[in-house]
Image (cartoon, coloured by chain):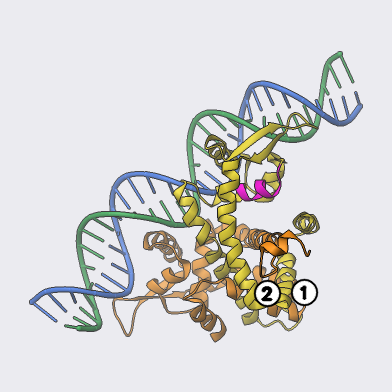
Chain colours: A orange, B yellow, C blue, D green
Amino acid sequence: MTDLKSLANPLFLREDELRQGIELLFYAYRDFTRGPDEILERYGFGRAHHRALHFIGGNPGITVAELLGILRITKQSLSRVLSALIEGDFVRQQQGTRDRRQRQLFLTDRGKDLEHQIAMVQQAKVAQAYREAGAEAVAGYRKVLAGLIDEPDRAAILRAIQRR
Amino acid sequence: MTDLKSLANPLFLREDELRQGIELLFYAYRDFTRGPDEILERYGFGRAHHRALHFIGGNPGITVAELLGILRITKQSLSRVLSALIEGDFVRQQQGTRDRRQRQLFLTDRGKDLEHQIAMVQQAKVAQAYREAGAEAVAGYRKVLAGLIDEPDRAAILRAIQRR
DNA sequence: GAATTATGTCAATATTGCTGACTTATTTTC
DNA sequence: GAAAATAAGTCAGCAATATTGACATAATTC
């Protein structure tokens, strides 16, 4: 411990500790997306559809540009996904009130059902992990993940998340 | 439906708290993969190549089957990625010693360089988040992420991660 | 009125994943 | 020692998700 490793790293974060943190994120994300994938398959949808459903569900009236900013994909990629969701009556568009160029997005009842169905699976998984880890660990989990969000949007994202 | 809901919430974990935990994971993962992506692009590689490089680098001599089990993709998907890495002299194969059917995988010097280059970027990001959050938060982060890993492999993964 | 913005659309392409069928070499089992 | 199982590789085809660049329309802002 008082060896080369900590000398090489002035902040006492050993390389293998950091590697563990990185791999845990990989494994957790890998397994976290599995449940949703199985449900979505039954509707002919994929992960991209779920992300759209999720963020429209959590932000009713969100504009296309805002959604693009969250998902960090191109307009064309989102377009395909949104078209499918609108076509299947999971999402509806409404001309913006304050700016009529905008299309505000909302879940239909069907969309709410599907979003909720998937959310329950993910929430059950997170709830179980939270319960096993305890409240203090949860606070740490949130703190570290927040720190992994890139500036300069971190503050805005944290505000948006905690608004609800 | 009502069953799922109560399953998700037996310990007074409010839905919006769980949603926050879910979204933090999404945002953190989104930004966490950005740095690597930019480096990989210069080599004509993608995220899949990085995952292979990473786990071969961390587990020299890993077999194809073991790597498939970690990545949870099919043999054919891995094959394309592995072929490109071998072709470009980033990875080399060696017939297994204990079982000659196996091909053990190793990084070449070139592969180690690239893996290291990307690892530095990711480790810097994690180190910064760890520093900002503090040691106690880091423990919580790890505890919750570990809980998100699916059984029955969780214990084996945790052992493998901590072996180094 | 001109410039900018929000959205949508077209065509082409890349990456990453999938399935199913089959082969070869090797090890294990009976 | 023969049969079965296993590890790996390969082929052909397909699907989801992403990309870029160019262009069109409508509405807002300057």
Q: Which residues are magenta?
A: B53-60
* Residue B12 figure quarter: bottom right
Q: Amino acid at mark 1?
A: Ala
Q: Could you tell me which residue is drawn at 47 percent across and 67 percent down?
A: A71
* Residue A95 figure quarter: bottom left
Q: Tell me, yes or no, whether the two marked residues, 1 and 2, touch with CB atoms within 8 Å.
A: yes
Q: Could you tell me which residue is drawn at 78 percent across and 31 percent down?
A: B97
Q: Could you tell me which residue is drawn at 72 percent across and 68 percent down?
A: B142
Position in image of residue A116 (x %, y %): 59, 72
- Quarter the C terminus of chain A occupies: bottom right
Compared with A74, A138 (above or below) is below
Q: Is residue A67 visible?
A: yes
- Mark found first going from the N terminus, 1 or 2: 1
**In the image shown, does B8 or B126 lie closer to the viewer?**
B126
- Quarter the N terminus of chain A occupies: bottom right
Residue occupied by mark 2: A141
